[in-house]
């Protein structure tokens, strides 16, 4: 605390001496605009004529550094100076260490007893981070896909581009600011991959010609074949029988060779001689023959069903099927 007050008192004493009449000097060349990266150094030069007594450096209206012919007066360790004495001029250089985004603003050098100021502007840019959601991407060969690269915490927003080390049939990309975040942007790469390789997202600060990149691996797999279940469903759909086709419907069931309708039996009873007994169904084969053409095997005669008719009472028919 005592040291700080001592420094302030020294500045006041020096300034009091420099305000004496007869001081005459001028700024030959003031500082130039500087753009630097966050965390680096910023340097400004102020060239004055000989005979100067006090050079003051200010940032955003606050004097941070004062230079006398004997020594610099440092009040902030982030601000230091270097001096260059020439035969016809004197150059004072102010160095701002570890610049931060909040340092961006107006820089001025001034001389005691002079209304002339040398002014410049300090711009501090911030290189943020890059992010691609996955470090290893697996995609299908020949199928279009998108890859997104996020640039987070950049000032100003960077220019984003892509470097493709992978065979593709086509590719394109576009970049837009992140909604609701003035310091972030995203870039979307659309491509149709044909093989394995790498994709690199590159973000660049044009003014400083500095960039940052992020690379991810791209693995291409073959399209999956259709499942056997899907193939069977398709095959079944193609071979499904038409339910409206009576001939096909007949083939799908079992044929009962011993069956005949009531109308057929009544017609046969009327044509038989008036006697009782057993009647073989051999005589009915002409009635079944059209349907037997669809059978692949004829049953033997021994397996034919037997039917008995009571000729005395033709209205009563007893039908028995022997299996």
Image (cartoon, rainbow, N blue to C red):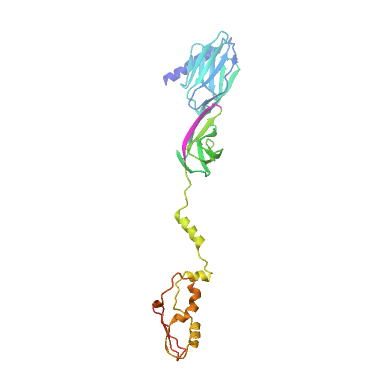
Q: Is residue 212 visible?
A: yes
Residue 104: name its quadrant. top right
Tell me, yes or no, whether the highlighted magenta stretch contains residue 196.
no
Q: Tell me residue 255's x, y (percent).
A: 45, 73
Count the labels in the image: 0
Which quadrant holds residue 276?
bottom left
Identify which residue, 225 or 64, lies in the foreground. Answer: 225
Q: Identify the residue at horizontal 57%, vertical 18% (top origin).
A: 110
Choose between 275 and 217: the one closer to the eye.
275
The N terminus, quarter of image: top left
Q: Is residue 96 above or below residue 253?
A: above
Q: Position of residue 231 (x, y in %)?
A: 47, 56
Query: For the stretch drawn in magenta, what is the main secondary structure?
Result: strand
Residue 127 appears in view = no
Q: Is residue 210 magenta?
A: yes
Judged from this view, the residue extending furthest toward the top is 87
Placement of 281 over or under 246, stated as above or below: below
Residue 125: image location, x then y, percent: 52, 29
- The region drawn magenta spans 207-219
Please tell me which residue is depicted at 48% across the width and 43% down the height of the picture. 139
Which percent across, then down, holds residue 2?
Answer: 42, 19
């Amino acid at each position: 605390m005592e040291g700080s007050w001592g420094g302030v008192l020294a500045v006041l004493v020096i300034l009091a001496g420099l305000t004496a009449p007869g001081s005459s000097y001028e700024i030959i060349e003031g500082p130039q605009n500087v753009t630097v990266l966050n965390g680096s150094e910023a340097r400004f030069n102020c060239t004055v004529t000989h005979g100067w007594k006090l050079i003051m450096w200010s940032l955003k209206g606050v004097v941070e550094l004062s230079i006398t012919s004997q020594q610099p007066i440092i009040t902030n360790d982030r601000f230091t100076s270097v001096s260059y004495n020439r035969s016809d001029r004197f150059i004072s250089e102010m160095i701002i260490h570890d610049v931060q985004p909040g340092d961006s603003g107006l820089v001025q050098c001034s001389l005691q007893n002079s209304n002339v100021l040398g002014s410049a502007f300090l711009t501090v840019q911030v290189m943020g981070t890059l992010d691609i959601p996955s470090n290893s991407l697996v995609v299908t060969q020949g199928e279009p896909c998108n890859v997104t690269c996020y640039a987070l915490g950049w000032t100003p927003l960077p220019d984003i581009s892509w470097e493709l080390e992978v065979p593709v049939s086509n590719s394109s990309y576009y970049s837009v600011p992140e909604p609701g975040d003035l310091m972030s942007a995203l870039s979307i790469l659309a491509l149709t991959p044909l093989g394995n390789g790498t994709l690199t997202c590159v973000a660049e600060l044009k003014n400083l010609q500095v960039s940052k990149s992020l690379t991810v691996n791209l693995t291409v797999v073959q399209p999956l074949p259709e499942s056997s279940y899907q193939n069977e469903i398709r095959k079944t759909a193609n071979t499904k029988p038409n339910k409206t086709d009576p001939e096909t419907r007949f083939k799908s069931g079992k044929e009962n060779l011993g069956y005949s309708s009531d109308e057929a039996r009544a017609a046969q009873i009327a044509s038989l001689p008036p006697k009782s007994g057993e009647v073989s169904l051999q005589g009915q084969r002409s009635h079944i023959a059209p349907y037997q053409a669809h059978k692949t095997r004829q049953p033997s005669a021994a397996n034919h069903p037997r039917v008995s008719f009571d000729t005395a009472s033709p209205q009563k028919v007893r039908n028995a099927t022997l299996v």
